[in-house]
Image (tube, rainbow, N blue to C red):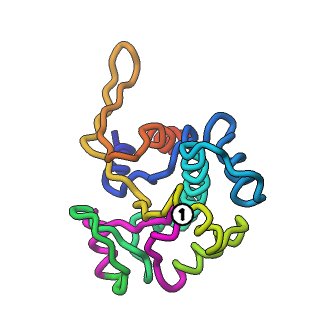
């Protein structure tokens, strides 16, 4: 229960779960062949959207993992593109002290990129970090243009709010109850609990 309460206070890392990438990460492998190695595009629009989403999700997860390692998941860094929890509105962090306090109250959260042409960009060092990840994957603005119809891009909060968490022990074992916003993965919550427990 203490671990659940901590996740509720700071937020759950809003990773995409492995199911996003297909069996043995097959969707991600196919996406890389098409979008990075420039092999032939899939014929079906649904398949193209699926593969673009897998690649976008992988880059998002990489940037999120860096925030978790840096212990800045619930922080507001200068240049961060912050999302208001109540309205979904976005704004650039100019005052990390004030915005950091708001983030700790879970009024706002930093966002990461689902790379695309219609996505908003952060500023400063945060922008450089995002662009460096793109470059490491062999992507540039032309690549974003090439998949603009299949994945126009968006910002995704780096953390998700865990609601009404409760751990209950009974004769069958341990039962967990909690709520998550749409798009967040319950399997990620379980992974966070297990990793913390064994670590």
Tell me residue 190's x, y (percent).
46, 37
Tell me residue 58's x, y (percent).
60, 54
Q: Quadrant of residue 163?
A: top left
Q: Is residue 23 left or right of residue 119?
A: right
The relative height of residue 95 versus residue 41 in the rendered view (above or below) is: below
Q: Quadrant of the C terminus?
A: top right
Q: Quadrant of residue 171?
A: top left
Q: Residue at x 39, y 24 (%)?
A: 174
Q: Residue at x 48, y 44 (%)?
A: 192
Direction left: furthest residue: 86
Q: Is residue 118 magenta?
A: yes
The magenta stretch is 98-125
Tell me residue 10's x, y (percent).
36, 57
Q: Nearer the viewer, residue 48 or 18?
A: 48
Q: Is residue 44 left or right of residue 177?
A: right
Tell me residue 89's x, y (percent).
28, 69
Q: Is residue 114 magenta?
A: yes
Q: Quadrant of the N terminus?
A: top left
Q: Nearer the viewer, residue 14 or 43?
A: 43
Q: Residue at x 40, y 19 (%)?
A: 173
Q: For mark 1, what is the residue?
A: 148
Report if residue 76 is visible in the image: yes
Q: Is residue 168 left or right of residue 31?
A: left
Q: Say what secondary structure mark 1 lies in.
A: loop
The relative height of residue 27 versus residue 67 in the rendered view (above or below) is: above
Q: Residue at x 39, y 65 (%)?
A: 74
Crowd tier of the residue under label 1, counting other residues whose Cα lies within 10 Å: few below 14, some 14–19, many 20 or above: some
Report if residue 105 is visible in the image: no
């Amino acid at each position: 229960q203490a671990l659940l309460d901590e996740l509720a206070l700071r937020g759950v890392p809003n990773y995409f779960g492995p199911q996003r990438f297909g069996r043995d990460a097959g969707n991600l492998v196919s996406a890389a062949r098409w979008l990075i190695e420039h092999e032939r595009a899939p014929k079906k629009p649904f398949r193209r959207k699926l593969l673009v989403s897998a690649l976008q999700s992988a880059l998002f997860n990489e940037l999120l993992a860096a925030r978790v390692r840096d212990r800045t998941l619930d922080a507001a860094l200068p240049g961060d593109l912050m999302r208001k929890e109540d309205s979904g509105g976005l704004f650039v962090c100019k005052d990390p002290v004030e915005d950091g306090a708001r983030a700790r109250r879970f009024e706002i959260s930093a966002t990461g990129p689902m790379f695309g042409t219609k996505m908003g960009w952060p500023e400063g060092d945060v922008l450089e970090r995002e662009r460096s990840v793109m470059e490491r994957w062999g992507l540039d603005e032309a690549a974003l243009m090439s998949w603009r119809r299949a994945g126009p891009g968006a910002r995704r909060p780096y953390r998700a709010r865990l609601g009404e968490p409760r751990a209950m022990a009974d004769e069958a074992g341990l039962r967990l109850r909690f709520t998550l916003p749409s798009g967040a993965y319950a399997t990620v919550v379980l992974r966070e609990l297990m990793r913390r427990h064994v670590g």
